[in-house]
């Protein structure tokens, strides 16, 4: 996989208060590890006090026009009960996007 620029969408939903502010995701950075198909992703999750969120990642191969690939083989700060702060995820792109080249 050859990746210079990776577009990811972080989808979050609040799992505690119904009247709380919606979650915000800022500072998303993704970088493929040299010689591998692992992608290190960092982001900041902003939530109201005592909230958690459900976080999932989606990959775009067309510069953010669509996000058809759900990143399923991930480790780190994803899925249920993610708390606020600086977060880290490792995506094994080989599982979800193998044998495809993205510039």
Image (cartoon, rainbow, N blue to C red):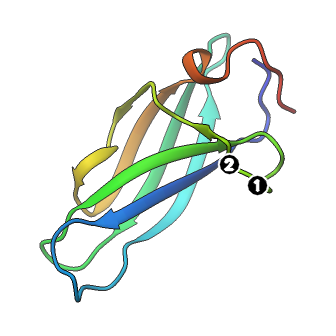
Where does residue 5 sit, x and y in percent of width and height? 77, 41
Q: As rendered, which of 65 and 25 lies closer to the eye?
A: 65
- Locate residue 4 relative to residue 68 in the image: left or right: right
| Element type where label 1 sits in the image | loop
> Which of the 4 image quarters holds residue 83?
bottom left
Nearer to us: label 1 or label 2 = 2
Q: Which residue is mark 1?
A: 64
Which image quarter holds the N terminus? top right
Q: Furthest-right residue in view? A: 103
Task: Using the image, determine if residue 94 lies above or below residue 31.
Answer: above
Q: How many numbered badges does the structure rendering display? A: 2
Is 46 above or below relative to 101?
below
The percent coordinates of residue 88 (x first, y second) are 39, 42
Q: Secondary structure at mark 2?
A: loop
User: In this view, which residue lies farthest toward the bottom?
Assistant: 19
Q: Residues within 10 Å of mark 1 (few under 14, many from 20)?
A: few
Q: CB under 8 Å between callouts 1 and 2?
A: yes
Residue at x-position 67% and y-position 23%: 97
Residue wearing tag 2: 67
Is residue 73 found left or right of 28 in the rendered image?
Answer: left
Give coordinates of residue 45: x percent, y percent: 37, 63
Who is closer to the viewer here, 12 or 35? 12
The residue positioned 29% from the left and 73% from the top of the image is: 47
| Residue count near mark 2 (Cα–Cα under 10 Å), binned few <14, some 14–19, many ≥20 | some
Give the residue drawn at x 60%, y 15%.
94
Q: Quadrant of the C terminus?
A: top right
Q: Which mark is residue 3?
A: none
């Amino acid at each position: 996989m050859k990746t210079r620029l990776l577009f990811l969408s972080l989808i979050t939903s609040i799992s505690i208060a119904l009247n709380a502010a919606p979650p915000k995701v800022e500072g998303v950075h993704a970088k493929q590890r040299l010689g591998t198909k692992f992608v290190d992703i960092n982001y900041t999750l902003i939530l109201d006090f005592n909230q958690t969120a459900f976080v999932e990642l989606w990959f775009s191969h067309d510069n953010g026009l669509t996000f058809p690939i759900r990143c399923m083989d991930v480790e780190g700060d994803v899925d249920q009960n993610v708390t606020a702060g600086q977060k880290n995820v490792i995506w094994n792109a080989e599982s979800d996007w193998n044998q495809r080249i993205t510039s």
